[in-house]
Image (cartoon, rainbow, N blue to C red):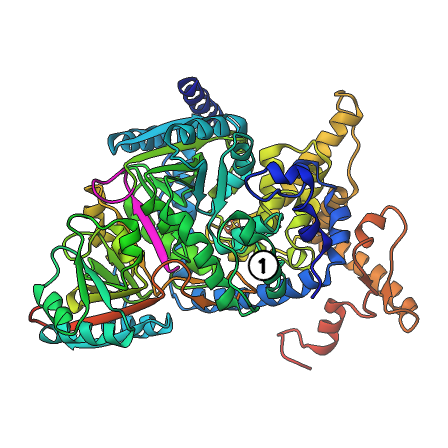
Amino acid sequence: MNIPLSIAAVGRDTADSVRLTPAPPPGRLIDSPRFPVQARVELGNAVQRKNLHQAMTTIRAKRAVVTAELDNWEQLRLAGEAIKNRTLRHLDHYLVQLEESLTAAGTTVHWARDAEEANRIIVGLVEESLGERREVVKVKSMATQEIDMNEALEEAGIAAWETDLAELIVQLGHDRPSHILVPAIHRNRSEVREIFNEEMGRYGRPAPEGLDTEPANLAGAARLHLREKFLRAKVAISGANFAIAESGTLVVVESEGNGRMCLTLAETLISVVGIEKVIPTLEDLEVFLQLLPRSSTGERMNPYTSLWTGPSSGDGPTTTHVVLIDNGRTKVLADPVGRDALRCIRCSACINVCPVYEKVGGHAYGSVYPGPIGAVLTPMLRGVTSPVDASLPFASTLCGACFDVCPVRIPLPDLLVHMRHKVVEAKAEAASGGRGLLHPHLEPVLMRATGTMFARPSLWAAAVAGGTLGGRILKGHVAHFGPLPWPLASWTGARDVPIPPTESYRAWYARTHHEDGSLK
Amino acid sequence: MSSSAREEILGRVRLALADVPPADETPIPWTYGQPRALDDVLDRFEDRIIDYRAAFERCSGAEVPARVAAALARYCARSAVLPDGLDDAIGAALVASGVAVRSDRPPLTRTELDATGAVVTTCAVAAAETGTIMLDHGPGQGRRALSLVPDVHVCIVRADQVVSDIPEAVARTVRALRERRPVTWISGGSATSDIELTRVEGVHGPRTLHVLLVETEGRG
Ligand code: SF4
């Protein structure tokens, strides 16, 4: 399998030689092209499409099995939703309680309004704690990706080493994650071997001679490469899956043990925690730690979960910091509809069932959060002014599969529609120069019209009659419409529209069934 | 700088929640700490451990030292760290079988730990439905690094420590957590599915987990 040029080429430019860690692709995510533009590019990547199809099919099946095993799965989802709602609706109270508990446990608490402030705090804390090597080891964390912390550390002359296998593949590959759970899912085993052979030696222990493409051997190479970094680690940086208000306990859920290495072997531990991660009590963990692994990797439980409450004498880091970050979250909270999105526990189930994600992969979303939750949360956090952010709420067919799997019952399809309205409003606002001129986007109008028809059976019958007549005329001539003219062009540009059937479902039902529902 | 950020963030939160009445409290439709109905808790625990491709055997308390020694011999572990509080008979059996036994007092350095083949610990509680073993790092369990860095972990679980599922297990560990002790949940050996979603056992944590379930009273 050929590796795309980007992997091999980016690492070798001269600017890279002064870097401590592999350079990611140039440019900021927020400057990415609009979703449909990048999606078209990604659709051309056959390796990625094949990997994704296989991976998503497997993970969906695993999730389905382990959630069906529990007779109280739906009750767990309701409980998860309720606990998160209770916390978010009094977030100020729980944040203050969390701060008190953390402080009482010996952890220093820092607050950051945005990414820049968070990075400034983190760089300062790292500087205070460094040993002779200017480096930190990292546990996989969405919050640190969101604030682009690695690059901030790099600019300060500090190397941040990713230790999760997939994150390592992404980092060494000069790449960006394409999934929140399995960030290197767009790479196949040959590509991984190529990346390891090419890059490991530049940043530490080289890949073993004669490394093959067996996943177990590739994982073995990562074990060897990272071990020396763990054994000499002075500073570790983590996120947290949950932060417990009553006790100041932080929880990290992982599989490989790299998290435990960082959380246990370093002398200073800095945890970067979004303010929405707080939950009230330790007992609440019984709900979330049943929901999360089953929704995420489709396992009954992930291999390792670490819970710690400040430094503990003779065991692990002697100094612990928590950086609580807002970075747009209070903006999301201020929208009584949009606030539901803050319940997200980053399990990735919605991404794994999304038919759009499965075809285009994560890079088209121009954000560290892809898939349905990314299409909702990214424009909420960043606003809808950049081209990519304004396009994200439309990166969905509204099929509803994401809500059905979401462990905290976030109504993702409703939120997508909600954000579409926000985009339309913002565009109208911009077009009118702030005078509020109406410039409706077509889809909301169509959706509203459909809603009216669903509500009135007579209108629906009339519309269906029109459709089946068209179907009868076209039948036998063509199987699908290609692109339709404006105003439907942007809809059909990426979709084939099937020719309407020659008979409606209602007509078929009336023809084949008696009034009591039995077959004729 | 930081304190004004604190005030500003809390201020933004309060402003954002202006629509929420102060007395509003979302009801939680959940009863905490309930057992899950299982036909046989120990059988379910065994199934789950085996499903994680970890080794599992049952024995009596008196058999533990010999079983531990046999397990280490099987994995060719020539050295082992034994935490304070572990039954002395285990150390004696290991020494008799030629294993170099290390204590963690004074604490082993990371490098020494990395050069140690195995660790033997007890646990605090285990959840059958998910095959999860919880350590609260009390006596017999050692600090967190001990059950992490060596490549083989033999874990001794008493039958009365096995509960049905996570809610009961969490209920049994909240005390340790409220005392601010770290707690580690272990469900099988370390694993990854990061390459093509193919499960690979053993990345950074111990690549081998060997569970000894002690069913009858006795030393253990
Ligand atoms: S929105 Fe729901 S399904 Fe998607 S990642 Fe968040 S918690 Fe999981």
On the rendered structure, is A372 left or right of A100?
A: right
Residue at point 25%, 46% (across, down): B182
Please state which of residues A442 and A343 is positioned toward the viewer in this rendering: A343
| Image position of A317 with respect to A177: above or below | above
Residue ranking furthest to the bottom: A520
Q: Magenta region, mostly helix, strand or loop? A: loop
- In x, y percent, where is residue A77? 43, 54
- Say left or right for A516 vs A137: right
- In the image, the segment drawn in magenta is A302-316
Q: Dividing the image into 4 quarters, which one contains the N terminus of chain B? A: top left
Name the outermost residue toward the left.
Answer: B218
Q: Secondary structure at mark 1?
A: helix
Residue A295 shows in the view: yes
* Amino acid beneath label 1: Asn
- How many numbered discs sit on the rendered protein? 1
Q: Is A81 on the left-hand or right-hand side of A335?
A: left
Where is residue A477? Give x, y as percent: 93, 71
Q: What residue lies at 21% left-to-right and 40% top-to-bottom?
A: A313
Label 1 Cα crowd, 10 Å radius (few <14 / some 14-19 / many 20+): some
Question: What residue sits right under mark 1 in the picture?
Answer: A197
- In this rendering, is residue A368 above or below A116? below
Q: Determine the residue positioned at 44% across, 58% down.
A: A224
Residue B32 makes an appearance in the image? no
